[in-house]
Image (cartoon, rainbow, N blue to C red):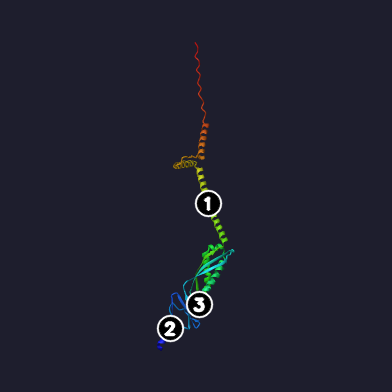
């Protein structure tokens, strides 16, 4: 019976000393208050209970949602900004020994850095340069958590809540910007059209016969339409050509030499006998 009791006690003691750690877990072991190096795990590990105490630490990437923070931007606009933070523990021993609660420390550092960095930029930069601000936040937070054995891999600004009056101002600004672009595009189209018309006018001025060809082409296009009434416009250039032709004909007639009529020679009377 004594041997059986001893075996049972040894069995339960071994069960208390044996632990199984998953692939993503590490164990920080304290023996009589002193930390043991290196960290244990993964797999089956043995600790001497009760003189050894074990703290499990997960090495998986953890996500923390930074609650909305009241931020006053550089141009004195009050906004609410929240973000998401991705981090993981690289050194389980540093995370346990250096900090009492490393999760709480990361949360506080993230919220403070978010208010500090975003308070230095203007609202336009906050809305337009998200990637640049995310990289800056990640760099600053990672520098502060590196001595703790924690790596901040990514920081993303999720949402920026603006006041109602500021939303109306931004909407008016966007509308004015769209109107400005529409006017610029319209003016550019008018400029190009006027340039084309001026070029066409120069060509017509150099070759007056081209206006007649264009006139005939217009008549042929009108003939294809099923209209009951067709108005034939007479271009001024055509009238000018006709007037010039008539003027040339009149000039030639005026410059022609006059013709003298032939007079009949009278026949002398016959002599009387």
Observer able to see residue 164: yes
**Residue at image coords 54%, 63%:** 127
Q: Nearer the viewer, mark 3 or mark 2?
A: 2
- Distance between the alpha carbons at the discs numbered 1 and 2: 88 Å
Task: Work out whether mark 1 precedes mark 2 in sequence or the reverse, and give the earlier one.
Answer: 2
Q: Position of residue 36 (x, y in %)?
A: 48, 81
CA neighbours of label 3 inside 10 A, class few (<14), some (14 to 19), many (20+): some
- Disc 3: which residue: 96
Q: Position of residue 66 (x, y in %)?
A: 52, 69
Q: Position of residue 143 (x, y in %)?
A: 53, 72
Secondary structure beneath dot 1 equals helix
Outermost bottom residue: 2
- Disc 2: which residue: 12
- Distance between the alpha carbons at the discs numbered 3 and 2: 29 Å
Q: Nearer the viewer, residue 75 or 2?
A: 2
- Disc 1: which residue: 186
Indicate whether 29 appears above or below 126. below
């Amino acid at each position: 019976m004594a041997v059986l009791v001893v075996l049972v006690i040894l069995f339960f003691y071994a069960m208390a000393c044996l632990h199984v750690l998953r692939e993503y877990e590490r164990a920080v072991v304290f023996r009589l208050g002193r930390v043991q190096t290196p960290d244990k795990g993964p797999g089956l590990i043995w600790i001497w209970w009760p003189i050894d105490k074990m703290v499990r630490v997960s090495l998986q990437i953890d996500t923390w949602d930074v609650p909305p923070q009241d931020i006053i931007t550089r141009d004195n606009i009050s906004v609410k900004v929240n973000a998401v933070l991705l981090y993981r523990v690289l050194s389980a021993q540093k995370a346990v020994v250096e900090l009492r609660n490393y999760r709480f420390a990361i949360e506080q550092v993230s919220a403070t850095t978010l208010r500090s960095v975003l308070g230095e930029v203007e609202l336009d930069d906050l809305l337009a340069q998200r990637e640049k601000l995310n990289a800056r936040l990640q760099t600053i937070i990672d520098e502060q958590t590196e001595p703790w054995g924690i790596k901040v891999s990514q920081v993303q600004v999720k949402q920026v809540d603006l006041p109602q009056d500021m939303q109306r101002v931004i909407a008016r600004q966007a509308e004015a910007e769209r109107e400005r672009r529409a006017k610029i595009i319209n003016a550019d189209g008018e400029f190009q059209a006027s340039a084309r018309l001026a070029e066409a006018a120069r060509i017509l001025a150099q070759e007056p016969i081209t206006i007649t060809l264009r006139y005939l082409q217009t008549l042929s296009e009108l003939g294809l339409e099923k209209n009951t009434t067709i108005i034939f416009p007479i271009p001024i250039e055509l009238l000018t050509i006709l007037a010039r032709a008539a003027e040339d004909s009149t000039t030639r007639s005026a410059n022609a030499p006059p013709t003298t009529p032939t007079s009949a020679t009278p026949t002398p009377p016959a002599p009387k006998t």
